[in-house]
Amino acid sequence: MEKGNLSIHSENILPIIKKWLYSDMDIFVRELVSNASDAITKLKKLADFGETTLDEGEEFFIRVAVDKANKQIIFEDNGIGMTAEEIKQYINQIAFSGANAFMEKYKEKTDASGEIIGHFGLGFYSAFMVADKVQIDSHSYKPDSEPVWWESDGSIEYSMDDGGKNTRGTTITLFVGEGGEEFLEIWKLRSILTKYCSFVPVPIFVEEIKDASEEIKESDDTEKSDDKPAPINDVAPLWIKPANECTDEEYKAFYHKVFTDFNEPLFWIHLNMDYPFRLKGILYFPKMKHDLEYIEGQVKLYNNQVFVADNIKEVIPEYLLLLKGVMDCPDLPLNVSRSFLQNDATVKKMSGYISRKVADKLNGLFKKDRDEYNGYWDDIAPFIKYGCIKERDFYDKIKGSVLYKTIDGKHVTLDEFIIDAPIAEDKKIVHYVTNEQLQSQYIQMFKEQNLSAVLLATNLDAPFVNYLETYEAGVKFTRIDSDIAGALKSDDISEDDAQPTGLEARFREILSNDKLSVRTESLKSTDVSSVMLLSEQSRRMQEMSKMFGGGSLPPGMFDEELTLVLNRNHSLVKRFTEIAENSDRNADTELVAQHLYDLAMLSHKPLGPEQMSAFIKRSNKILEMTIS
């Protein structure tokens, strides 16, 4: 028997690995299964190269067994195997230059995607996260090779001797120690394998050893077919098939299986690239809620069909994380740090490629079937708007396919709206609505004059509007209640339409509001007595301050710049202005002034409790006056 010391600068590797990967103890399952899969893949390649031969019809497998009574977890494969010299090279010589430098460099790597075991040749040693002792039994594919046995308790010492394994491949036995007992539960192990290894390209069989005298049996929930255990994984996931060989039913079935979403996806993009990097995957556009805060996407990143992590924004453009999908990137290390990703040129190219493919898909749908695309719009609008804000290149590619829903229920592009909207004073003024109910009076006035406005009612629309005004020269967005559009004003304006003397002062006195602006306008609509206008700039400053200031503002900062507009063409306003100009303040003029103000406010925002109570009481009084 050979004994020796592992080539590391530490008295005990176990505490280092446990400390480093404490938050992800289950990672050892992925690492050992990945190694087993690699061993089989290497053997197949050697056979393809003619360097070895395989038995006809040979079936490859990865076996994961749990012996709870003896506190063992066993990983077995029938892959390439190892000789004694290879174990000395790959196991005994741990590929990092010193534990102290190692820990110093990575002590702050605490995020879940920060571990890089494979990058340092430590995949096998992740076993010591749960094991007090690890044993290897291996037999190489090489002719005349001898089986080898290896064992270590995680210290710098190991034992190595001739082995007893009489079949090609490797068996790794973990003797589970304190703190790792949860992994001896078969359901726990299956859940980890499902998470990381659902698409590993080699069949994985999970077994439970009931007791020492019994043969290995399947776990109770493993499906059986002709008395043969079924693998827990799909070795040929849909993304590795050419797109032209996949049916809609297959795409939908895969979506339901992977994301447990019972809703149908709207559509999908099949990604396939071999140069300058390898990338395969499927991105699904799910039905989305309209508020960005409640959109939860999930894009799963794989390496050679082994799960790496969800939603790694360094690889996948951030706005795409609103979608659901899978991406397999063999050119990325299985364990990869975010600092590596942020500085890797291939990753940047990959992100750009994905963004371009998404834009191409959306533009293609827009051009191929506009009606179908219009039907998708309400669901995909949050994703597209967010993508435009986050990435200028995406906006430049997709802006011609960005739609706006109008108050008439139509879907138009920005260019179509500007061309078609009969706005006399400026063809590039875009009126918009944020709340159809509150702004219904303004909407009605617009419709009466065949004017249009677009609906921008989500939290995302405010920054989206600011973004558009930055990059679309000459385009100005104005909320429908920020001013009176020229087309709403009467064409018949006489010399008597000058502002009544003292009207603003009278309203300020009655309403105890010395900041209120009041003016009269001749509107085409004779049904509207008064409207409230809110300065676009003032409102945007308020919204921005609340967004970045935690929701509340100091008193007096960015107060609403309100303007009460009285319609001179309304009979009530005509009579009121006559009385107001020719008499002192009295109960009747005060009551009408307050009511005109509240009627205007009702189309601006909900009245407060006290205001609403006063409005109802005043309304009743006015009704009494009309029948007295």
Image (cartoon, rainbow, N blue to C red):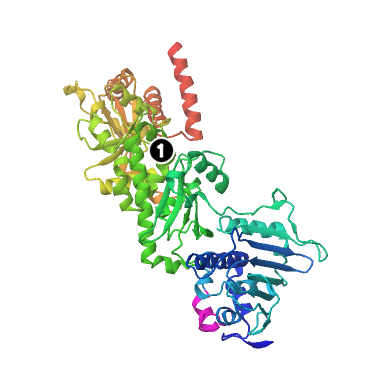
Q: Quadrant of residue 71?
A: bottom right
Which of the image's four quarters has the C terminus?
top left
Q: Amino acid at mark 1?
A: Ala
Q: Give the residues drawn in magenta, as a range.
A: 91-107
Q: Nearer the viewer, residue 359 or 503?
A: 359
Mark 1: secondary structure: loop
Please provide percent x and percent y for residue 606.
45, 34
Which of the image's four quarters has the N terminus?
bottom right
What residue occupies the far left of the structure in this picture?
A: 495
Q: Nearer the viewer, residue 371 or 495?
A: 371
What residue occupies the far right of the structure in this picture?
A: 213
The residue positioned 44% from the left and 58% from the top of the image is 313
- Compared to residue 56, the image places residue 605 above or below, namely above
Asked if one can make out residue 516 in the rendered structure from this viewpoint, the answer is no
Please provide percent x and percent y for residue 295.
49, 46
Q: Which residue is mark 1?
A: 457
Q: Residues within 10 Å of mark 1 (few under 14, many from 20)?
A: some
The residue positioned 49% from the left and 24% from the top of the image is 617
Asked if one can make out residue 46 in the rendered structure from this viewpoint, the answer is yes
Please provide percent x and percent y for residue 96.
51, 80
Q: Is residue 68 magenta?
A: no
Q: Nearer the viewer, residue 100 or 335?
A: 335
